[in-house]
Image: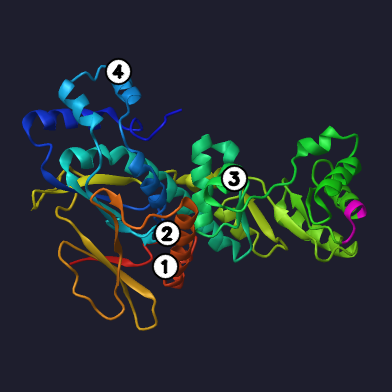
Amino acid sequence: MPTGPALLTDRYELTMVAAALADGTADRDCVFEVFARRLPHGRRYGVLAGTGRLLEALPDFRFTDEDLAALREQGLTDPRLLDWLAGFRFSGDVDGYAEGELFFPGSPVLTVRAPFAEGVLLETLVLSVLNHDSAIASAAARMVTAACERPCIEMGSRRTHEEAAVAAARAAYLVGFASTSNLEAGRRYGVPTTGTSAHAFTLLHDDEESAFRAQVAALGVGTTLLVDTFEVDQGIRTAVEVAGPELGAIRLDSGDLPTLAAHARELLDELGATRTRIIVTSDLDEYAIAGLMAAPVDGYGVGTALVTGSGAPTMGMVYKLVERDGVPVAKRSLGKPSVGGRKSAVRRHDASGTATAEVVSNEAVLPRDGDRPLLVELVRGGEVCAPATPREALAAARAHHERARGAMPAEAFALSRGDCAIETLTA
């Protein structure tokens, strides 16, 4: 496992640095911007996530003796490059949208100003973190919408890389998930954790009743019993018989969930367990959750669809040089053009406080009533502007997302394919 983020970098970043050191351009003052050219097909907004994780990693972006030895083993032996890397410390400035903010095509979600060699070296790490976390947060936000204030539980750890699982749990909690099954996300970020038992625990015992009695003895009657290992009706009857009418919840993990949930509710009520909740799992995504809106379901456990971005595992963000020594620069590649010059951005609102447009400009946007500047200072002179613990940063991002989300027009949250929730204007 890497001891720091320095080698979580594409080799071509180092070859560019080596060439720039050799020809004297490494110290040119440059501005890089991170943006998405487009959103995943039919999505109406994206959610920026991962900024807090990036700021956590930045102070540790150093090349140790072990890192440099690894580079030599891979054929990177240029003495000038290795000497420069040995002394590397990021000294530039970073601005960006607050974590949890909603974004749209062309939104300058992160701006890095630094000497070329320093700025280009951050590209891979920045894009790796922001593309992954923003994809998860954007999908999770749609699931929260579909759940209509019923709690969602993140439980996708076994469906992705072990570190991606922690980041996914963080991103899901940021946009409103209630808890996670991932213990490291609980330790590192303070995300509430939850979990009871799987089918294996039932099969371990001689019969379902013995398994339920063991779980209730360990966790109390407020626990959640998994009732579909064998036959659902009998599982529910056994669960109520063992735990009594104060049983906390049952979980359904297979079958026709809307029909099963309706039948389970009727049976629970018949047995006097009127306050026992029904939790459903089993390959849920935002559409499956929306399809359960009319069912008597009290919570959702989401795994695979969440940690894979529900069909959009990356946000397609790019990291482009837009200014060199104060001169705007842009690429004109067919289908992949960029817009030169450093950008400013504001969110425009009507008199009721509802967002109406995003204004992106190479100049300072002339403010109007209701405009909210979107770019905030994150790093100055290589130092994080408002240092926070990982838990504090996540709590702030969650609160910011709730505020930003509350200002969006209602149509932003439709799950059907459509245009962006608000228009992006260039000035």
Residue type pointed to by label 2: Gly
Residue 111 seen anywhere in this rendered image of the structure:
yes
Q: Regarding mark 1 in the picture, which secondary structure is present there? A: helix
> Would residue 251 appear left or right of 242 to someone viewing this image?
left
Q: Name the residue under label 4.
A: 74
Q: Which residue appears at 57% of the width and 42% of the height?
A: 184
> Looking at the image, do the residues carrying marks 2 and 4 touch, with CB atoms under 8 Å apart?
no
Considering only vertical position in the picture, is 262 above or below 317?
below
Give the mark nearer the N terminus: 3 vs 4. Answer: 4
Q: Mark 2 points at which residue?
A: 100
Q: Which residue appears at 80% of the width and 65% of the height?
A: 275
Residue 35 seen anywhere in this rendered image of the structure:
no
Q: Position of residue 323 (x, y in %)?
A: 13, 50
Q: Regarding mark 2 in the picture, which secondary structure is present there? A: loop
Q: Position of residue 36 (x, y in %)?
A: 31, 51
For marks 3 and 4, give the CA distance.
38 Å
> Looking at the image, do the residues carrying marks 1 and 2 touch, with CB atoms under 8 Å apart?
yes
Q: Residues within 10 Å of mark 2 (few under 14, many from 20)?
A: many
For marks 2 and 4, give the CA distance.
38 Å
Q: Give the range drawn in magenta.
A: 241-245
Q: Which residue appears at 28% of the width and 40% of the height?
A: 122
Q: Regarding mark 4 in the picture, which secondary structure is present there? A: loop
Report the mark closest to the observer, 3 or 1: 1
> Looking at the image, do the residues carrying marks 1 and 4 touch, with CB atoms under 8 Å apart?
no
Residue type pointed to by label 4: Gln
Give the mark nearer the N terminus: 1 vs 2. Answer: 2
